[in-house]
Amino acid sequence: MTQELVDNYLRRLRRGLGGCSKKVKESVVMEIASDIDSRIQISAGDSTSVILSLEDPIDLGRALRAVHGSGMSTRLRYMLVAPLLGFASYPAFQSVIPSWPVNLCLLLGTILVIRGASLTGRITGAIIGGLMAAPRILLMLGTGAALGFIQNAIGYEAWTIDGGTMFVVILTSLMLPILGFFIGKRVSSPL
Amino acid sequence: MARRKDPVSELRRGALELALLAFLDAEPCFGGGILGGLAEATNGGLELTEGALYPALHRLEKRGVLSSEWREDADASRPRKYYSLTDAGRERLLALTAAWRSLSDGLTGLLGESE
């Protein structure tokens, strides 16, 4: 029972530290585990009262994450996936392949930006959002320019991008870095 | 709506760095020991939560004011992480102590006059 309570506390602490590097997580968990052991020893083995007297492990983990920041591997993972989802959420793909899940990709990308920003903070959140927005905007501008060229060169006008679609794609794309910035709020911590 | 912070907590938060440095200047200590020791040394005036203590210790360590090492104590089943002051920490303690004394003297005079 004692070990189960402690393990559960440490498991939740690890969750609060989500996004930190493995080295930081292990060091923090080891430190808190050893301090919990000491307190249980002092309280003559009353682990329940010790665990109940401790700060919420998720809050503690978050406060420590604010000190250590997110690990490079976490940031890289989000930064690599964001442009892929940005690319996949480009609406013109649906014109070529009607079953292409554009909205699902956009939704997944937005969730990725929110999750990434909440784990890694404001600046990285804005970068993740920007990395998802960039391929959408570049593809939109590139497609518009290419279709304009085709129309001028050979007079083929079956494929066009209307101004409204272009506006919506650029607007939703520009919202992504802003979303990342505001979701990645600072965690208040002492000192 | 912005959450209003408890003024007493804010005061404690402001004094936390000085309290930690002063406590650790006497001898190196681990997190759990600091929690109990600080409360005892300040007659319960500075009872910290883990959420205030550990981030503060880690931040001070990152700033180079504290250093840490893992030690195997005979009375503990796991190694403990002991914190101690660095040279920069001792300098900071002197500077903060002087600032605190000056502030405290000024405030004591002010509060004395207002009573």
Image (spheres, coloured by chain):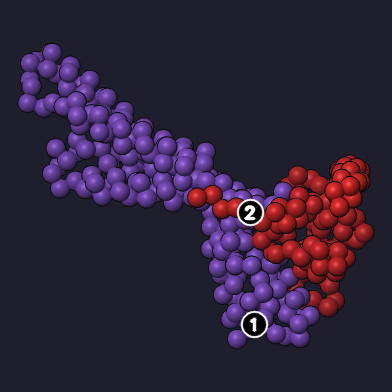
Number of numbered discs overlaid on the protein picture: 2
- Seen from the viewer's position, the closer of residues A52 and A2 is A52
Residue shown at 81%/67% (left/top)? B44
Chain letter tied to red: B
Q: What x and y, as percent, mark residue B103? A: 87, 44
When the figure is inspected, residue A26 is found, relative to residue A175, above or below; the finding is: below
Q: In the image, B109: left or right of B72?
A: right
Q: Amino acid at mark 1?
A: Thr
The color chain A is rendered in: purple
Residue A48 - label? 1
Residue B56 falls in which quadrant of the image? bottom right
In the picture provided, is B27 more to the left or to the right than A91? Answer: right
Indicate the position of residue A167 as horizontal and vertical percent values: 25, 29
* Observer able to see residue B80: no
> Within 10 angstroms of label 1, few (less than 14), some, or many (20 or more) residues?
few
Q: Chain of mark 2?
A: B
Which of these two is toward me, B32 or A140? Answer: B32
Q: Nearer the viewer, residue B76 or B30?
A: B30
**Do callouts 1 and 2 point to residues on the same chain?**
no
Q: Which mark is residue B5?
A: 2
Quarter holding the N terminus of chain A is bottom right
Q: Is residue A86 visible?
A: yes
- Check disc 1 and report its element: helix, strand or loop: helix
Measuring 60% from the left and 52% from the top, which residue is drawn there?
B4
- Image coordinates of residue B34 in percent, x first then y, are 81, 64
